Image (spheres, rainbow, N blue to C red):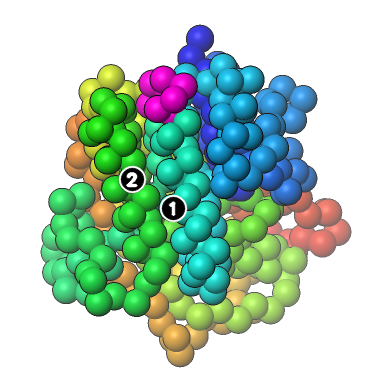
Amino acid sequence: MTSVLVTGTGGMGAHVVARLLRSGVDCSFYGTGRQAAALGEFVDPAKVPIYKGDILDIDTLKSAVRKSAAERIIHTAGPRATQTRTNPTEGMRIHLVGTGNVMEVARREDIERVVYTSSSSVYLATKKGQSPSRPILEDDPVVPMNHEDVYATTKVACEYIGYNYAKAHDMSFIALRMSHVYGPWSGDMGRGVAISSMIRSSLVGEPLELEEQVAEWTHYYDLAEEHYLACFSGNVKVGTFNAGSGVISSLREIREVLAQYADTKKISISNKLLTRRSVPSDLTRAKDQLNYTPQYPIERAVKEFVDWWKTKLAPDRQQPMRK
């Protein structure tokens, strides 16, 4: 049985491990484990070891690889976009040195494959001038030299580190460029927290004010599935793949779907600071080479997300179901 070490104990790492477990894969975590309560909602800590350590500590990482007998690594660890932009020095250090450590340990320990969680932010050059009629391809331009987003630059640099190692040492490296993630997770989140907040507020009847966001929202379950497929695909050794839903949606559109299951009258969405992404990812390569097809469109995802939130809220806090 193949053993997989997943770096990062946040939402993406948790969902990836949960997906691996459903297929009977022997897996373990490497990370801080600081969000233990949230992690425990998806993964039984008694069944999945957490090797605690910093991604910047190469010796501890190497020890975890050996103790876990890992044959493959899925590297999700790293600060979110807002964290990197707020503290660029720390963000760059963790992303770049951390990814370098993962690739170096993988080289030394003869790891069969590294799957890296990258970001669709790398397409910043394309997003500004792209026609909405053509989705973004993996071969489209990435961040230009004169762009201001250090997070996007670090993600591209991490991909290059992986590709450099793969070329120089005949290793297997796959990068997944994730779109904006959302779904069940009670720990720290990025932009997807807006959708989670909408559902919670509608269920408890609390007012909520949000700024509109138009993005390629992608469910945790779909992204976890693509990580699983990339980890075990026999069709590709080195490659880059879009990881998304292939659909652009606004928070207003998501609120309309949510209104089928809860009272959304107290949720207001402003256009004051509108962030817009009008061009979705092209998923043809992911479908053809990884056999990846998203299974959680907004309608299905919102319904299941509502059900998940209900399990977390006491019955006396929930508003009556809409008829």
Residue 112 at x, y percent in the picture: 38, 21
**Residue density around tag 1, few if under 14, some if 14–19, many if 20 or more, within 10 Å:** many
Q: Is residue 279 left or right of residue 53?
A: left
Q: Please state the extent of the stretch shown in magenta in the rendering.
A: 106-113
- Using the image as rendered, state which of residue 291 and residue 199 is in the foreground: 291
Secondary element at image label 2: helix
Distance CA(mark 2)–CA(mark 1): 8 Å
Q: Is residue 262 above or below residue 243?
A: below
Q: Is residue 22 left or right of residue 108?
A: right
- Label 2 sits on residue: 161
Q: Is residue 280 above or below residue 111?
A: below
Q: Is residue 33 above or below residue 45?
A: below
Total number of numbered labels? 2
- Label 1 sits on residue: 96
Residue at the spot 72% in from the left edge and 48% down from the top edge: 35
Considering only order in the chain, which callout, 1 or 2, is on the residue closer to the N terminus?
Answer: 1
Residue at the spot 45% in from the left edge and 45% down from the top edge: 99
| Residue 60 in which image quadrant | top right
Residue at the spot 16% in from the left edge and 57% down from the top edge: 140
Q: Amino acid at mark 1?
A: Leu
Magenta-drawn stretch contains 255: no
Secondary element at image label 1: helix
Are discs 2 and 1 less than 8 Å apart at CB? yes
Q: Is residue 208 left or right of residue 240?
A: right
Residue 146 at x, y percent in the picture: 25, 77
Q: Amino acid at mark 2?
A: Ile
